[in-house]
Image: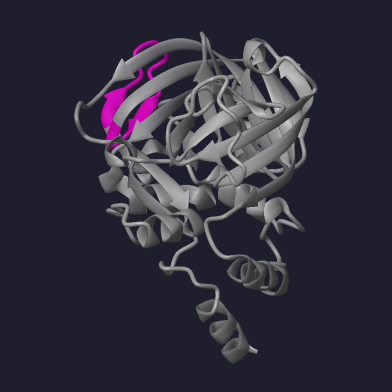
């Protein structure tokens, strides 16, 4: 069985050994661009306007003014398109979504279907088989059917990996998230609603969220286990000497910037609990240090085959 898994793994056509590849988002040029499709016409660009806040199901949030209807189609292209242009006949990728909720200034959409051309169809089929046969294991979130392709599309843009501090100066937890982002004066963070981390955030009502330098990628990934850990003494965590300006929450070592966030409300969607915060402060801790993010191997393989620079940080 392990031999079959190894053979199938090698036939998937992926360039890199890891499913997600870390990088410096500030130095990653030429990423695909996302647009709303209005029928057969290109609408406004959504690349920087949307937030990716869920993977089971795939959830996107964006300002309500940019998504006025109950259905949303996003087309993804390699170059710039202008409003009013015809939608490409064969876009690099596309997502079809439906409105599921509104919170504050944001409208949230659930993906129903996704398709991409990052890899040939037969390679995608092999990846689907590999996912179905080998990813249904205890403790793993299995992405059924088309959902795994939707996730590959979502991670064709670098998604910032940040560290959340919850607790106080005497006892706290520190864990990563890549499902988050700001809109206006509000901030949205998505966590597993069955995890200890989400329960700690709900109880505390406030957090510090730090964007991290790329050099910290191994440390940040290693903190993923803390989603299911209780608070502990700050000395047991990779925290630096800095404290957040208003609440004095410990700031991680290698943080480049941070937000103090006060909880407004929350709601559940799939396996996720989406927390809506008010931004209480925003601080720059280091300049020109880059920003840690990651992308999916499927996109990275497509980029490699098309001559795009990678500069990936392999764990």
Above or below 17: residue 282: above
Residue 131 in picture, x, y percent from top left: 66, 67
Residue 48 in picture, x, y percent from top left: 47, 25
Q: Nearer the viewer, residue 80 or 227?
A: 80
Does residue 7 belong to the magenta stretch?
no
Number of marks in the image? 0
Residue 94 in picture, x, y percent from top left: 63, 42
Q: Nearer the viewer, residue 120 or 125?
A: 120
Instruction: Examine the rendering and report whether any part of residue 31 can be seen.
Output: yes
Does residue 247 belong to the magenta stretch?
yes
Whether residue 35 sits left or right of residue 284 in the image: it is right
Above or below 213: residue 131: below
Most distant residue in the left direction: 288
Q: Residue at x 32, y 16 (%)?
A: 283
Residue 21 in picture, x, y percent from top left: 41, 55
Q: In the picture, residue 63 is in which quadrant?
A: top right
Write the start and end of the magenta stretch as one range: 241-255
Q: Residue at x 52, y 22 (%)?
A: 49
């Amino acid at each position: 069985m392990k031999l079959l898994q190894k053979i199938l793994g090698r036939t998937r056509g992926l360039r890199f050994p890891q499913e997600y590849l870390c990088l410096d988002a500030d130095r990653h040029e030429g990423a695909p661009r996302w647009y709303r499709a209005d029928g057969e016409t290109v609408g406004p660009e959504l690349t920087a306007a949307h937030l990716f806040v869920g993977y089971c199901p795939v959830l996107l949030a964006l300002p309500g003014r940019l998504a006025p209807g109950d259905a949303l189609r996003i087309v993804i292209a390699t170059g710039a398109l202008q409003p009013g242009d015809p939608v490409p006949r064969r876009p690099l990728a596309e997502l079809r979504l439906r409105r599921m909720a509104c919170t504050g200034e944001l409208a949230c959409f659930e993906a129903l279907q996704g398709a991409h051309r990052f890899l040939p169809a037969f390679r995608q089929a092999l990846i689907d088989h590999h996912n179905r046969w080998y990813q249904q294991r205890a403790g793993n979130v299995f992405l059924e059917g088309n959902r795994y392709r939707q996730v590959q599309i979502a991670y064709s843009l670098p998604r910032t990996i940040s560290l959340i501090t919850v607790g106080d100066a005497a006892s706290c937890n520190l864990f990563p998230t890549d499902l988050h982002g700001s809109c206006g004066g509000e901030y949205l963070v998505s966590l597993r609603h069955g995890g200890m981390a989400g329960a700690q955030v709900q109880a505390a009502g406030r957090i510090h969220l730090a964007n991290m330098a790329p050099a910290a990628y191994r440390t940040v990934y290693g903190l993923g286990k803390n989603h299911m850990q209780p608070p502990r003494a700050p000395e047991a965590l990779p925290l630096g000497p800095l404290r957040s300006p208003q609440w004095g929450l410990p700031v991680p070592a290698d943080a480049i910037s941070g937000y103090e966030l006060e909880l407004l409300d929350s709601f559940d969607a799939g396996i996720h609990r989406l927390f809506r915060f008010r931004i209480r402060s925003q601080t720059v801790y280091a300049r020109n240090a880059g920003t840690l993010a990651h992308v999916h191997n499927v996109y990275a393989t497509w980029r490699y085959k098309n001559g795009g620079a990678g500069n990936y940080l392999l764990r």
